[in-house]
């Protein structure tokens, strides 16, 4: 299903986005990640990532948002992006999560050629419990998320009970 929010913003719904797990987890940390991409079949990449996370015993998927198609920011000479939010539970630390998510990006051939470049898969930690971290290699909450429709719109869907 498809829902146009405006001339430049469209929500897509499928079997995994949005998703809400009916089971509870005992994992102690709540992690909200933003995923995005605009190279290749992004919807298929998101589904593959979901299935990989679902089978990774370090993570428990609580819920996901619908997928938002939106224009790029920063570097504008590229295709629209697709973005979604995934809420996970884990016993990993923020830095262990960062490393795990970077490995997932690498599996999907993520290249970091320049700032705001096109990409197959980008995974950002938006929130980790209610903590704040401001280090060179990790900033939580994610820097600039409050200014990005690509985060704010999908985030509204996972905030709902």
Image (cartoon, grey):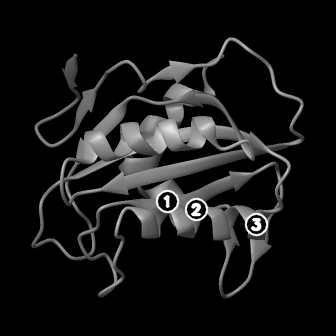
Give the CA separation, mark 1 to mark 3. 14 Å
Query: Considering only vertical position in the picture, is 147 above or below 46?
Result: below
Mark on residue 101? 2
| Residue 47 left/right relative to 54 | left
Q: Residues within 10 Å of mark 1 (few under 14, many from 20)?
A: many
Q: Nearer the viewer, residue 96 or 115?
A: 96
- Pick the quarter of the image with the C terminus: top right
Residue 68 vs residue 145: left or right?
left
Check disc 1 and report the residue beneath it: 123
Which is more N-terminal, label 1 or label 2? 2
Element under disc 3 = helix
Separation of disc 2 and disc 3 at Cα?
Answer: 9 Å
Q: Nearer the viewer, residue 8 or 13?
A: 13
**N-terminal of the two: label 1 or label 3?**
3
Quadrant hosting residue 69: top left
* For residue 153, side relative to residue 77 (left or right): right
Of marks 2 and 3, which one's residue comes earlier in the chain?
A: 3
Q: Which residue is mark 3?
A: 96
Q: Quadrant of residue 109?
A: bottom left
Q: Residues within 10 Å of mark 2 (few under 14, many from 20)?
A: some
Q: In the image, which is nearer the foreground, mark 2 or mark 1?
A: 2
Q: Are marks 2 and 1 in contact (CB under 8 Å)?
A: yes
Marks 2 and 1, how far apart at CA? 6 Å
Q: Can you tell which of label 1 and label 3 is closer to the viewer?
A: 3
Q: Which residue: 55% across, 68% down?
A: 103
Tell me whether circle 2 and circle 3 mark residues in contact (CB < 8 Å): no
Residue 119 in the figure: left or right of residue 55: left
């Amino acid at each position: 299903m498809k829902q146009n929010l405006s001339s430049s913003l469209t929500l897509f719904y499928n079997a995994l986005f949005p998703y809400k797990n009916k089971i509870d987890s005992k994992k102690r940390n709540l992690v909200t990640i933003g995923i995005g991409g605009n190279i290749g079949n992004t919807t298929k990449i998101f589904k593959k990532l979901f299935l990989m996370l679902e089978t990774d015993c370090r993570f428990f998927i609580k819920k996901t948002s619908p997928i938002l198609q939106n224009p790029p920011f920063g570097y504008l000479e590229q295709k629209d992006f697709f973005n979604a939010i995934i809420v996970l539970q884990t016993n990993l630390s923020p830095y262990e999560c960062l490393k795990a998510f970077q490995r997932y990006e690498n599996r999907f051939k993520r290249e970091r050629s320049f700032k705001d470049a096109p990409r197959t898969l980008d995974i950002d930690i938006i929130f980790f419990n209610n903590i704040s971290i401001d280090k060179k290699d990790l900033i939580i909450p994610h820097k600039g998320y409050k200014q990005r429709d690509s985060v704010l719109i999908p985030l509204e869907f996972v905030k709902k009970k």
